């Protein structure tokens, strides 16, 4: 539930008419696709270098998020969900509109940037420091982080380089590091799609605790059941545009009805 102390909802993120565009390299190489395709590529290049194209990923999105909310972002592949998260985190600039945030948003797996050649143990320490924890706090929470991730359940993987981990193991460790402290705004992109049912349940419980500590959680997931179980609100993006924003169950129902018609 959103924080309503003092009779007011406290906003943590406000997006006001946000557009995000970025340039993709290596698109439209000459000599491929015939004359018609080549002409189309020439006409589509507006103030971009040869071999590049501009992607308009988010188109006029507006919303306000509040303390204590868990908000799911849903939509088909390429709908702009991950791009919007990166913009909220300050990693991508807006081309139009503004994003206002209270505190520093933390994008899971980016703020705690982990290094493949270092052991899991060293990455826990560096990831914690990157999120602003003191060394003493990291020492106090270290074992909880490792236990939460579950990566040592089948061996002493925490002492091995992270490049030896599966993608699921790496994602679980990133989530465990990020979840070890409270956040004003925590942005999660598909981390809960990894791991077994036990890890997913622990993750949902941890998100609930973050919300109770007056944080705001954004979750991108292709699992509609995860959105239903974890979030109280959902935002549906399609082709970069906001199609619906409301109670998670209602928005997911509308999205599923839409996809069945395709």
Image: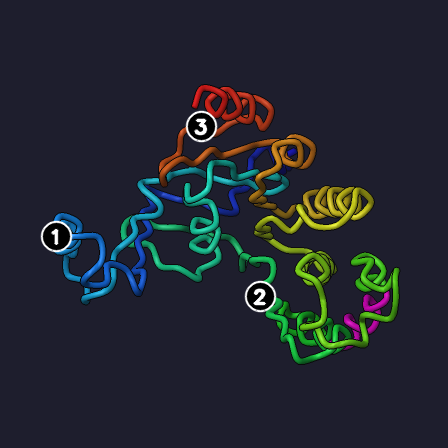
Give residue 244's mark.
3
Q: Main secondary structure of the magenta part?
A: helix
Q: Which residue is mark 2?
A: 111
Viewed as shown, does residue 208 lie left or right of 27? right
Q: Which residues are magenta?
A: 135-143
Q: State left or right for residue 179 relative to residue 47.
A: right
* 153 relative to 67, above or below: below
Location of residue 166 in the rendering, given as x and y in whole percent from the top left corner: 70, 62
Q: Residue at x 19, y 61 (%)?
A: 31
Secondary structure type for disc 1 = helix
Q: Residues within 10 Å of mark 2 (few under 14, many from 20)?
A: some
Give the mark, 2 or 3, whose residue is nearer the N terminus: 2
Q: Earlier in the sequence, mark 3 or mark 1?
A: 1
* Figure label count: 3
Asked whether residue 66 appears in the rendered view, the answer is yes
Image spot of residue 220 (x, y percent): 56, 44
Is 137 colored magenta in this rendering? Answer: yes
């Amino acid at each position: 539930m959103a924080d309503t102390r003092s009779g007011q909802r406290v906003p943590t993120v406000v997006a006001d008419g946000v557009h995000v565009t970025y340039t993709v390299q290596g698109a439209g190489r000459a000599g491929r696709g015939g004359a018609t395709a080549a002409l189309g590529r020439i006409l589509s290049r507006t103030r971009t270098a040869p071999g590049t194209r501009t992607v308009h990923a988010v188109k006029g999105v507006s919303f306000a998020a509040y303390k204590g909310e868990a908000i799911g972002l849903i939509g088909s592949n390429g709908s702009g969900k991950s791009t919007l998260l990166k913009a909220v985190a300050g990693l991508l600039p807006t081309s139009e509109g503004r994003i206002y945030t209270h505190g520093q948003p933390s994008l899971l797996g980016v703020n705690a940037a982990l290094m493949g050649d270092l052991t899991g143990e060293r990455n826990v320490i560096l990831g914690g420091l990157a999120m602003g924890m003191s060394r003493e706090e990291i020492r106090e929470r270290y074992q909880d982080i490792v236990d939460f991730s579950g990566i040592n359940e089948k061996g002493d993987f925490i002492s091995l380089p992270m490049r030896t981990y599966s993608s699921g193991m790496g994602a679980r460790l990133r989530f465990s590091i990020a979840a070890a402290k409270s956040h004003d705004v925590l942005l999660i992109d598909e981390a809960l799609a990894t791991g077994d049912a036990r890890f997913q349940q622990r993750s949902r419980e941890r998100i609930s605790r973050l919300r109770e500590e007056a944080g705001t959680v954004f979750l991108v997931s292709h699992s509609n059941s995860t959105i239903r179980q974890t979030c109280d609100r959902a935002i549906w993006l399609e082709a970069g545009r906001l199609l619906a924003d409301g109670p998670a169950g209602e928005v997911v129902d509308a999205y599923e009805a839409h996809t069945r018609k395709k």
